[in-house]
Image: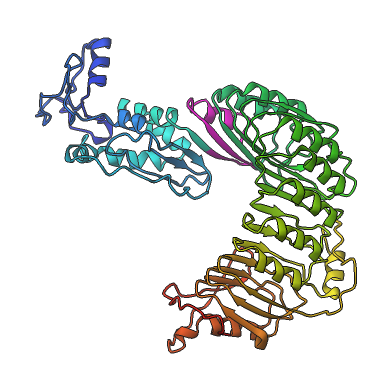
């Protein structure tokens, strides 16, 4: 006679709950079952260790300590996070001790790190809940162990695990159905139905992020629209080899059909040609790599944030003035506007300021070499509540900075003026002195050596005139900044700077990349909270001077802190975390 032995890989989750019992009664008991009705293990030679006090479906008040099956626990917990990567490495947390309704689930097939806050768990469970997580479901395998195994499997492995037994199959299905956020990398070698096969399993998907390494076309967009009826957020990024073939009409139909879509971000929109967007729910819109658009119509009354980045080509035929005029009239609730285009001009600024958007807080007009001090005057006269102003690549001068300081002394916290060749060190010093709430300032490529400007213009990937409108009296300049709230300062590419003095107690990040003429003897840094200094392309003597000043409190320590390298290869001088924050007096140098 063949003896039946307990097999751990066949053991289904053994926990009994009212839901599981109700399903059993509804189906009715089938003949020929040799498994225990409580734990699912073979009956022969088996003594069930589960009590008979579990609540039945007709119990009016089931006990609070009633266990929940593994499949039900996986589906009922809104704090569950499942990440599966394209390289098939994953991170996920076991089921929480009791459901947390405010945390979301996510499913991912990429190499991105888990976002901060997704691993928050509720620690308020009792001892009975902790025992449920560690309950043995056969062969020494607990509910938490099953969860840890399944969450680390790739899609193919998860499909194979679903064939082990009924319990594993139900758990796998519930994991897919409970997903609310999916981050998927689509390889170049993937088949056409790869995305569709994944999305069909995620019936509750709300947020989708795709990293396309193959071409994106209307078929993919239609697949997303069919498989995700309740989609709220979609982000599509493209690799260097992928081509976005979606046209403006196809994008307009997609947006019109998604009645609950609130956020749309898409890269590589070169082939749009023109579009008409009609949506009452859309609040965030990011489109990049736009080129020669014949029409742009925005019927989005609830749109609050828009980012439009055009390709860096001079022959772009887009009529930005007409586009801005229609945008501000149909989207009165705009708060953040970012436009990057070589075609930005003073007439575009006038069309923007004519609408007088009362909710506007952030304005970014980048690479507009025809934006002048007159444009700044129009901006400050219409929008006096701006918190961020980015005019990088414009032709404004120190006079424009003076107008900005007169209007925004108690509002502006971030000012970005990179690639503005008409700005001098005097204008930068005036801005830091007149804007007490300033926390971030970018002045990259403003104070430049004329020889460096000529070399940059020759090797520039797009045509931007960085030459100053008038010849400066001094080639090399000095910069003195004293600010109580400034946290980030960028002076990258300021090759015309030879002396720098900083007294910023809250400064934590300083970018001095390519400041090759900055003299070590004319450098003074009084920033006790400084964490990193970017010094790629600087003199070796300058690196030693920076290290000696930021580590002066630890000169007796034999092991000086080495340079760190960031992703772009720039050197970073790491400041020790235990650096004493000594207050600096006004007369200290």
- Nearest the eye: 551 or 441: 441
- Nearest the eye: 586 or 286: 586
Residue 480 position in % (x across, y down): 67, 77
Left or right of 399 on screen, residue 384: left
From the image, which quarter does the C terminus lie in?
bottom right
Residue 170 position in % (x across, y down): 35, 26
Asked if residue 101 shows in the view, the reply is: yes
Left or right of 79 on screen, residue 231: right
Q: How many labels does the image show?
A: 0
Residue at 31% in and 31% down? 73
Was residue 211 drawn as part of the magenta stretch in this picture?
Answer: yes
Left or right of 209 on screen, residue 68: left
Residue at 71% in and 69% down? 430
> Image height check: is 209 above or below 372?
above
Residue range (magenta): 183-212
Asked if residue 292 shows in the view, the reply is: no
Residue 244 position in % (x across, y down): 73, 37
Residue 582 position in % (x across, y down): 46, 78
> Image height check: is 464 above or below 88?
below
Which of the 4 image quadrants contains residue 32? Answer: top left
Residue at 17% in and 16% down? 60
From the image, which quarter does the N terminus lie in?
top left
Was residue 455 drawn as part of the magenta stretch in this picture?
Answer: no
Which of the 4 image quadrants contains residue 44? Answer: top left
Residue at 66% in and 88% down? 521
Q: Which of the colour schemes (rainbow, by chain, secondary structure, one colour) is used?
A: rainbow
- Nearest the eye: 392 or 457: 392
Which of the 4 image quadrants contains residue 159? Answer: top left
């Amino acid at each position: 006679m063949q003896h039946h032995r307990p097999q751990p890989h066949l053991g289904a989750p053994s926990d009994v709950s009212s839901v599981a019992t109700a399903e059993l009664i509804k189906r009715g008991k089938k003949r020929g079952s040799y498994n225990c009705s409580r734990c699912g293990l073979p009956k022969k030679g088996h003594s069930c260790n589960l009590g008979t006090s579990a609540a039945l479906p007709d119990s009016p008040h089931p006990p609070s300590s009633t266990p929940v099956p593994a499949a039900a626990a996986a589906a009922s917990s809104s704090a569950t996070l499942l990440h599966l990567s394209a390289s098939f490495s994953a991170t996920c947390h076991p089921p929480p001790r009791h459901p947390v309704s405010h945390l979301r689930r996510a499913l991912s097939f990429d190499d991105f790190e888990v976002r901060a806050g997704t691993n928050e768990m509720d620690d308020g469970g009792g001892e009975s809940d902790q025992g449920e997580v560690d309950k043995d479901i056969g062969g020494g395998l607990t509910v938490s162990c099953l969860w840890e195994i399944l969450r680390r499997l790739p899609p193919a492995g998860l499909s194979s695990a679903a064939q082990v037994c009924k319990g594993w199959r139900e758990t796998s299905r519930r994991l897919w159905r409970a997903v609310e956020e999916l981050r998927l990398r689509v390889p170049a070698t993937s088949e056409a139905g790869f995305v569709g096969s994944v999305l069909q399993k995620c019936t509750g998907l709300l947020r989708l992020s795709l990293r396309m390494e193959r071409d994106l076309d209307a078929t993919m967009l239609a697949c997303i629209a069919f498989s995700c009826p309740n989609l709220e957020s979609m982000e599509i990024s493209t690799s260097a080899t992928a081509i976005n073939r979606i046209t403006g009409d196809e994008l307009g139909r997609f947006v019109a059909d998604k009645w609950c879509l609130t956020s749309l971000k898409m890269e590589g929109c070169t082939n749009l040609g023109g579009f008409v967007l009609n949506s009452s729910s859309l609040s965030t819109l990011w489109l990049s790599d736009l080129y020669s658009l014949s029409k742009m119509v925005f019927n989005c009354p609830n749109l609050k944030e828009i980012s439009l980045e055009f390709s860096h080509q001079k022959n772009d035929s887009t009529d930005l003035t007409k586009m801005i005029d229609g945008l501000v009239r149909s989207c009165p609730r705009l708060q953040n506007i970012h436009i990057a285009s070589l075609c930005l001009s003073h007439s575009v600024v006038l069309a923007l300021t004519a609408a007088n958007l009362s909710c506007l807080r952030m304005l970014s007009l980048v690479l507009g070499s025809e934006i002048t001090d007159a444009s700044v005057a129009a901006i400050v006269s219409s929008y006096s509540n701006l918190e961020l102003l980015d005019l990088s690549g414009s032709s404004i001068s120190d006079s424009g900075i003076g107008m900005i300081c007169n209007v925004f002394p108690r509002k502006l916290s971030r000012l970005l003026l990179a690639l503005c060749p008409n700005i001098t060190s005097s204008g930068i010093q005036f801005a830091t002195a007149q804007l007490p709430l300033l926390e971030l300032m970018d002045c990259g490529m403003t104070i430049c050596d004329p020889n460096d400007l000529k070399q940059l213009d020759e090797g520039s990937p797009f045509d931007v005139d960085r030459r100053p409108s008038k010849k400066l009296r001094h080639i090399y300049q000095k910069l003195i900044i004293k600010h109580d709230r400034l946290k980030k300062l960028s002076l990258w590419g300021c090759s015309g700077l030879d002396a720098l003095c900083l007294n910023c107690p809250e400064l934590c990040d300083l970018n001095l990349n390519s400041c090759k003429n900055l003299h070590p003897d004319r450098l003074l840094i009084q920033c006790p909270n400084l964490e990193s200094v970017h010094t790629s392309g600087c003199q070796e003597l300058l690196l030693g001077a920076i290290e000696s000043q930021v580590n002066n409190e630890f000169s007796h320590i034999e092991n000086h802190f080495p340079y760190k390298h960031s992703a772009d290869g720039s050197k970073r001088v790491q400041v020790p975390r235990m650096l004493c924050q000594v207050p600096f007096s006004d007369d200290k140098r």
